[in-house]
Amino acid sequence: MSPTDPRSAADPQTAVHQSNVSQYFYGSVAAPHAHFGIGGSAAGAAGSRRRATGWLDAQEVDGVLASYVRPVCFPDAARMLEKDSVVVLVAQPGTGKRSGAVALLDAVAESGTGGTGGPAEYVVLSPDLDLRQLADRTFTAGVGYVLLDRMDEGRAGTADFDWRRVRDQVRAQGAHLVVTTVHGAGETAPEAVHHALWRPPDLADALRLRLRKAGCGDGTVDRAVRGLPAGCRIGEVAAAAERICAGADPDDVWREYGDSASRPVRDWFAEDRTLQEIAEVTTLAFVTGAGRRAFESYQEMLEPRLEQEFAGPPPPPGRDGDDDTPATRPRPDQLSSDQPRSDQGRSDQPRSHQRRPDRRRSLARNALVTTEEHSAGSPVRTALVFPGPQYRSWVLEELWENHSTAYWDGVRDWLTGLVGRIPDAALWMSVSSGLALLARPAFEEVSVCYLHPWASGAEGHAAQSVAVLVLWWMSQDDALDATALTLARGWAQSADPGLRRSAALAFSGPLGVRFPTDAVKRLWTLTGRDAETSLHARSALAQLVVALVESGEDAGVVLDLLVYRLGLQRRKDATDRTKGVTFRAALQVLTVRVARTFCPVVAVLTTEQPGFRPKLAELWAAVLCNRPLRGDALRSLRAALRALPQAGENPREVAREFGASVGAALPPEERELLHRVLEPPASLAPEPTTLTNTFRAALLSPAR
């Protein structure tokens, strides 16, 4: 079976289960029209989302502050932050809480109360930290800390005590902390820390400032401000302003944001719709970009599962194909109350003798459905999509608001059967992105009916992989990324081995890129569980390195952990099991390959990021000195040396410095032994032979 075959991902005993899904997400397979975040589709977001935690660089801070407009609630929150060193912003998604938190910390730093008298540095903390962990951590004087989307811990009885400890710790260490949450303080608001209701700034002022800073003329600014639709969020205003500054027409831009974006969808749902029409938009909401034949087959699979929500099966079309209108079927309030639901609205004519609905003509009349041409070589393929990427989330919201449990039971059964029977990567991507969008208005539905049963493996390994993909898409959404982290944490702590396996896979990809420190912490804990969970967790650590490298993020978070853990194994009290887990985890990181190029990731790191060479050398030295793993380590080392020309420029120089680093990390006797066993056979090509000899020579002259 090919490593890119989706069926291979269904085997939990093979290492390709994780790499396949990563390849789907990072590779050429995309989910067009997913429209995650603000101003773009998820197709591009997958590889572009940066880590959500850690130090904020100066460029990002300057970008936030340069166009920031203070809302009316800003002075009060700044005053409380200056007084208590901690403030909590109760903020709904889309209110600019991240920018507001940075601006508040900057205001306090400018006042000189931060202890430095100048601009502070900024650190974004993990939303996985609870109040007790916050109170126990160390804060650096003069640094501003932000904790976004703190989850409700449900400990109202100790909330004031916990907040008081956090406040005293931050204040005593000369730092400042801004916490944001969607959960209000409730009737018993903690007295120790002020909870401020946060509002977005005036959107027209924010738009005007951004456009003028970009040099737009007064005419463009006035027209853009006049056209600003109701219902926009601050992030949408920022995205629209960027497009207008790039030359886009304001009227065209605003059609995709706020109420302007939702109006066509709301108008369509305002009319009575048949089962067939609802099935069309439901299918498109979860299977976007499919070809005509595949789409119609998916829709045909769905329709019988929705009959419980309607008066009967879809009516047969008339001579002109236009009889599939609301008037052709009785409304629920017109039916006899004593008539069985299963018989309501059914024709006396057997289903086999009824005319099949003309799906293609009906789709052509549906205002929420259009086609686009996809060219992946030749021939061109026609795909069914929404008229705009913003339609999809609004359709899912309307479906959730307008249909009952019977409808959603049918959708659940349909999607479960779909992903279980059709091993198609593009289908998995589309279904998972649709469920992630549905999580915005209906998180409990997605969590209970899909994520938990699918992630446990109860519906098969294909559904388990799709559940992980849902979390990956959620991690690309500022409103859901903390929720995705919380879900994965719960799976990792579960007694269910299927959920633990899903947690390992979830942390190996985009969720781990978004929250790398949390991912490493959870994955390392999982390596200490049962043998199967440990295997998946070690593989996930290696895949996380690949994901971090491909995303342009710092892979040092994994390497640092392994170097530290290998150091602990030198202690006399280290058990054989922990030694085995640690050494094998290190070897997997040194062996794993980038999915798209099949190049060992260590070759990429050694070539492109020389600062990692000492850490990588320590890992190589450890596994090469471990006799049970020595053979596998030598094979991986030779593979890395052969891949240096593929990884970047100046492979001979890289091989020389690489060899010197490994030599410095090895004991003298191991250095001599490695020099002997690495002598390349005469059958090798000249270039690999040269690189190996360069590496061997450098081993004996280690850098100090």
Image: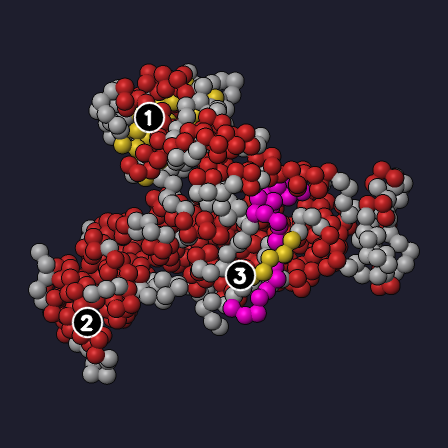
Estimate how packed mark 3 is, as few (under 14), some (14 to 19) or many (20 or more) residues with alpha carbons within 10 Å.
many
Q: Is residue 410 magenta?
A: no
Q: Extreme right residue here?
A: 348
Task: Give the residue pinned by disc 1.
Answer: 105
Q: Secondary structure at mark 2?
A: helix
- For marks 2 and 3, the one nearer the N-term is 3
- For marks 2 and 1, the one nearer the N-term is 1
Image disc number at residue 691: 2
Q: Is residue 324 left or right of residue 700?
A: right
- Residue 311 appears in the picture as rendered: no
Q: Which residues are magenta?
A: 377-399
Q: Is residue 492 left or right of residue 635?
A: right
How did the renderer colour the structure? Answer: secondary structure
Image disc number at residue 425: 3
Could you say which is closer to the camera, residue 553 or residue 22?
553
Q: Extreme bottom residue here?
A: 683
* Number of marks drawn: 3
- For marks 3 and 1, the one nearer the N-term is 1
Above or below: residue 216 compared with residue 307: above
Above or below: residue 291 compared with residue 484: below
Task: Give how far across and how far down residue 565 sits, in percent.
Answer: 26, 51
Q: Secondary structure at mark 3?
A: helix
Residue at the image position 56 percent from the left and 47 percent from the top:
389
Task: Give how far across and how far down residue 135 sits, in percent.
Answer: 33, 28
Do the residues under discs 2 and 1 have CB atoms within 8 angstroms? no
Q: Is residue 382 magenta?
A: yes
Above or below: residue 46 compared with residue 170: below
* Three-letter amino acid code of the residue under disc 3: Ala
Do the residues under discs 2 and 3 have CB atoms within 8 angstroms? no
Residue at the image position 59 percent from the left and 64 percent from the top:
381
Could you say which is closer to the camera, residue 406 or residue 564?
406
Task: Give how far across and how far down residue 313 sits, in percent.
Answer: 81, 53
